[in-house]
Amino acid sequence: MSEFRYTVGDGSTDVVLSRAPLSAVLAEHLSAEPATLLVADQNTIELCGGYNGPAVVLSAGEDAKQWHAVATILERALAERLTRDGRMIGVGGGVICDVTAFAASIYMRGISLTLVPTTLLAMVDAAFGGKTGINFSGYKNMVGTFYPASLLLVAPAALGGLPQREYQSGLAEVIKSAMLGDAELFGYLEREHTAVQARDQEALQAIVERSLAVKAAVVERDFSERGIRVWLNLGHTFGHALESVAGFGRYTHGEAVAWGMACALDLGVALGITERRYAARAFALIERYGFVLQVTGVQVEQLLQAMRYDKKVQSGSVRFVLQRDLGQTDVLPVGEEDVRAVLRSRIV
């Protein structure tokens, strides 16, 4: 078991990265005291057999990332008379982590939070860093807060039973982490493709720990996304637009982000910013992990309209996270005609 403490905002997050089965990690850390409220979905509640306290069970999937789910959590917390010294515990993937953290951040102006991610996407991205959020009016993560968990329990052994499409979805964020700030992780993903795809325990430990370290290096310097934290949105301006326009659930978050990273590389090359050799290497890695980099069933103008609601819009211009080379990232405003040309090439 490895333990890390990262400074996140005004506080800190203790990360416990365990080689033990998730059931053992939960049995050791979950409290059944009256001052806790557990939040899970219909799948992950089965993992919480040792917990005897109050619980909210939400539907599985993106549909739960809505106001009604947050209201359900808040109503149960109030019914259980959870006080400001209480704690919410979210056990699940990115949706559960996001809605539980959002509810904890606004209930009585904030109570303690423990997150237990059960998917690769949540382990390397959604559960760590303090971003909370729900979808609103058809747009991805339009409503949210910054509210880090005080405790993050990560058990990569749980990934053995994850459906392949969900596991692959998380790999997109691992690739993104490597592109942003870890050349060794990038090389590891190239060399150890077989072990990563086979979910070898050592490979899982390595990619989760290194991805968390990349995100921590950014978040510790810029918690509230006033500067370099925007880099973590590499591929997300395109990807979130795809999720919104296609309908949440048609593409997984990772599939959309992988496509979005390809679009960002295309855009950088077209603008003369991104080194072609690096772009080719990144394209090869993304495709090697099974991501399809052309999409169907969406229109260019619909995607552009969704991008106009992106949180990186400033003074009427959409800013895009672009890369010059591995680990060399910038955020730049780009004209719609350039974006339109890239979108046309990535839609069939």
Image (cartoon, grey):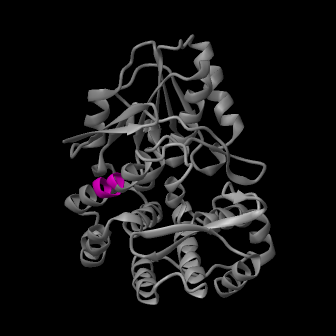
Q: Is residue 199 visible?
A: yes
Looking at the image, residue 256 sits to the left or right of residue 342; the answer is left
Q: How many marks?
A: 0
Q: Nearer the viewer, residue 295 or 241?
A: 241
Residue at 64% across / 79% down in the picture?
295
Frontmost residue, 44 versus 303: 303
At which x and y percent is residue 217?
Answer: 36, 51
Query: Is 79 part of what is drawn in magenta?
Result: no
Percent coordinates x, y for residue 279 in the rendering: 46, 84
- Residue 329 against residue 297 in the figure, above or below: above
Please tell me which residue lies in front, 217 or 306.
Answer: 217
Q: Main secondary structure of the magenta part?
A: helix
Q: Where's residue 346, x and y in %?
A: 64, 83
- Quadrant position of residue 172: bottom left
Query: Residue 273, relative to residue 240: is it above or below?
Result: below
Is residue 299 visible in this depiction of the protein?
A: no
What span is in magenta? 208-213
Which residue sits at x=40%, y=68%? 175
Q: Quadrant of residue 246?
A: bottom right
Q: Residue at x 46, y 89 (%)?
A: 276
Left or right: where 308 falls relative to 222: right
- The x and y percentages for residue 108 are 60, 18
The quarter of the image holding the N terminus is: top left
| Residue located 76% across and 70% down the image | 304
The C terminus - image quarter: bottom right
